[in-house]
Amino acid sequence: MSDIKKVAIIGLGIGRSHITEGYLPHADRYEVTVLCDLNEERLNAVGDEFGIEKRVKDFSEVLAMPDIDIIDICTPPGSHFQLIMQALSAGKHVVCEKPLVGSLADVDAVIAAEKTAKGRLMPIFQYRYGDGIQKAKRIIASGIAGKPYVATSETHWVRGADYYAVPWRGKWETELGGVLMTHSIHLHDMLTYLMGPIAGLFGRVATRVNDIEVEDCASASLLMENGALATISATLGSQEQISRLRLAFENVLIESNHEPYSPGQDPWKIVPANDEIGAKIDALLANWSPIPNRFNTQMRLFHEALVSGGPLPVTTADARQALELVTAFYESSETHTEVRFPVGPEAKKYKSWRPA
């Protein structure tokens, strides 16, 4: 492709992975020309590693650069809302790491701004991409799986004192939440990506593993719009790390791999109810083309959408759905009641779930 988009990366923690996994594999589509980070040592280290000459510490300098097409926001969560709104106002396309923002009120404001903006906004949900999850998506979408029965989602990771020694982590003001916002949000997005929207949630959160402000354990019972039942559990105190989805349908059992940071890749377990269903699945997947994992495929699809004007691979509506779940989780845990969906301005936690 000749339409190469010039990219500025803001924040070089996870931002470095965006370069290595997302942009470098697509050198015919993207050129990372600007790096921005408050940490000068990290700024220079990443700049030297990838030969990127333009390095700034002031975000306003990036906004004023006329040759930048895409601003990729990889900063701590508490800064996302302001940076997104400024980048859209400057006419740039925007990529933003999860969590997109810190409340449903903020995401609704972003959606409103996006409607009149010149640029387009893509939230990051890279775990949707890989052969395992995309095969599961195709089987479910084809109708072969049949009626959905139950699902489980387990994000069992470990995070300790070293992780929370980073000053912005573990605090409501800067991280915006705990395991629900920063860790299990990926697998929960995968759950709704495959099982559809949520109708109701009863959840509990607790801080049991670390001496931090935000939660590091959570569990919930969900009713999906299609009638299926689902359970969620998440912790940062598991000595063996796994991310696992297990979905039971009328005609097939689907279970993800257990890789904590790449659950979308193969192998996934696909267990058909009988030989006839198995033959249908084999035929459906017979000419499968491999799908690169994580940022690689999401960034390729983003470029295709920008060039064609077609639908984005991940949208602000997807980000809102993820934050709807988080909002319901916090409200249900506090009120000890089920929260029904959709969650709108009438919800107690719509404007903020952070303690006063």
Image (spheres, helix red, strand yellow):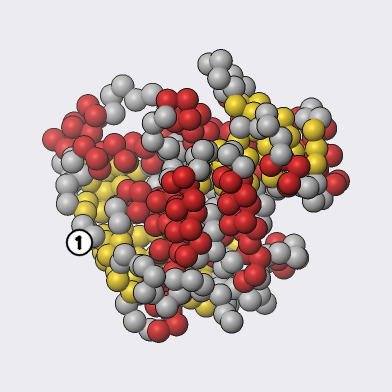
In this view, the residue farthest toward the left is 276
Up/down of 264 relative to 202, above or below: above
Residue 200 seen from this side = yes
Task: Indicate the quadrant where residue 336 lies.
Answer: bottom left
Instruction: Please tell me which residue lies in front, 283 or 116.
Output: 116
Instruction: Please tell me which residue lies in front, 79 or 253.
Output: 79
Residue drawn at (29%, 53%), measured in percent from left and top?
196
In this view, the residue farthest toward the bottom is 335
Residue drawn at (35%, 49%), measured in percent from left and top?
193
Residue 244 shown left or right of residue 281 in the figure: right
Residue 135 percent location from the top left of the image: 34, 36
Residue 79 percent location from the top left of the image: 65, 58
Instruction: Please tell me which residue lies in front, 157 or 187.
Output: 187
Up/down of 289 relative to 272, above or below: above
Residue drawn at (30%, 71%), measured in percent from left and top?
340
Residue 15 percent location from the top left of the image: 67, 43
Which residue is the site of mark 1? 227
Instruction: Please tell me which residue lies in front, 106 or 146.
Output: 106
The amino acid at mark 1 is Gly
Q: Considering the image in quadrants, where does the C terminus appear?
A: bottom right
Residue drawn at (72%, 30%), measured in percent from left and top?
33
